[in-house]
Amino acid sequence: MRFGRFLPLGALLFAAVLAADQLSKAWILYGLRLPEKGSVAILPVLNFTMVWNHAVTFGMFGGVGGAGRWLFSVVALVVVALLGWWMAHTPRAHVAAALGAIAGGAIGNVIDRLRFGAVVDFIHAHAFGWSWYVFNVGDAAIVCGVGVLLLDGLLDRRPAA
């Protein structure tokens, strides 16, 4: 296997997710002006609802105060560096793409933390009394990327060495 064979694919997904994440957040903040409106119904099952997330996934570790901004950013940067190493060494295109998507979403959230002190979340899915956590484009890319990695691990049928 050639080193970095699928690195360009992972880098492409990284850049695409990061751009989509940051552009969508800029539109939400400055185009739609969602912080002033609070929430806007898009579909019967979807709203854009402004949430400033000072914690991490699902609000975990929200009690660390102002240090969380820097702590979560440093941890995310270390994880992204490890994902980059993995991306450069994987022999599978779909794994490189998934890693790029995860890294792009993570860096998008780091940018928010450093700019605003919190992550911009705004996508709110709901139906039949059920409501999911409010998230953003980068979060969705992270979840999809992790899903691909899980499926890859579950479906990998290569014999053990």
Image (cartoon, rainbow, N blue to C red):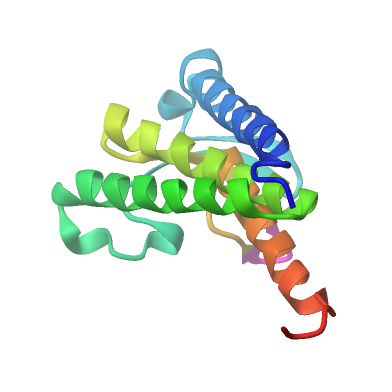
| Residue 107 among magenta residues | no
Position of 131 relative to 25 (above/below): below
Q: Residue furthest bottom?
A: 160
Give the left or right position of residue 9, taking residue 141 as reference. right
Give the left or right position of residue 26, taking residue 54 as reference. right
Q: Position of residue 92 (x, y in %)?
A: 77, 54
- Examine the rendering and report whether any part of residue 122 can be seen: no
At a point 35% along the width and 50% down the height, the residue shown is 78
Q: Residue furthest top?
A: 31
Could you tell me what secondary structure mostly forms the magenta stretch?
A: strand
At a point 22% along the width and 51% down the height, the residue shown is 71
Which stretch did the figure color magenta? 126-130
At a point 44% along the width and 59% down the height, the residue shown is 57
Q: Nearer the viewer, residue 111 or 3?
A: 3
- Examine the rendering and report whether any part of residue 141 can be seen: yes
Q: Position of residue 41 (x, y in %)?
A: 66, 37
Give the left or right position of residue 155, taking residue 96 as reference. right
The tally of labels here is: 0
Position of 156 relative to 54 (above/below): below
Image quarter for residue 117?
Answer: top left
Image quarter for residue 129?
Answer: bottom right
Q: Position of residue 161 (x, y in %)?
A: 72, 83
Position of 141 relative to 42 (above/below): below
Q: Nearer the viewer, residue 58 or 124?
A: 58
Q: Position of residue 148 (x, y in %)?
A: 73, 60
At a point 73% along the width and 36% down the height, the residue shown is 9
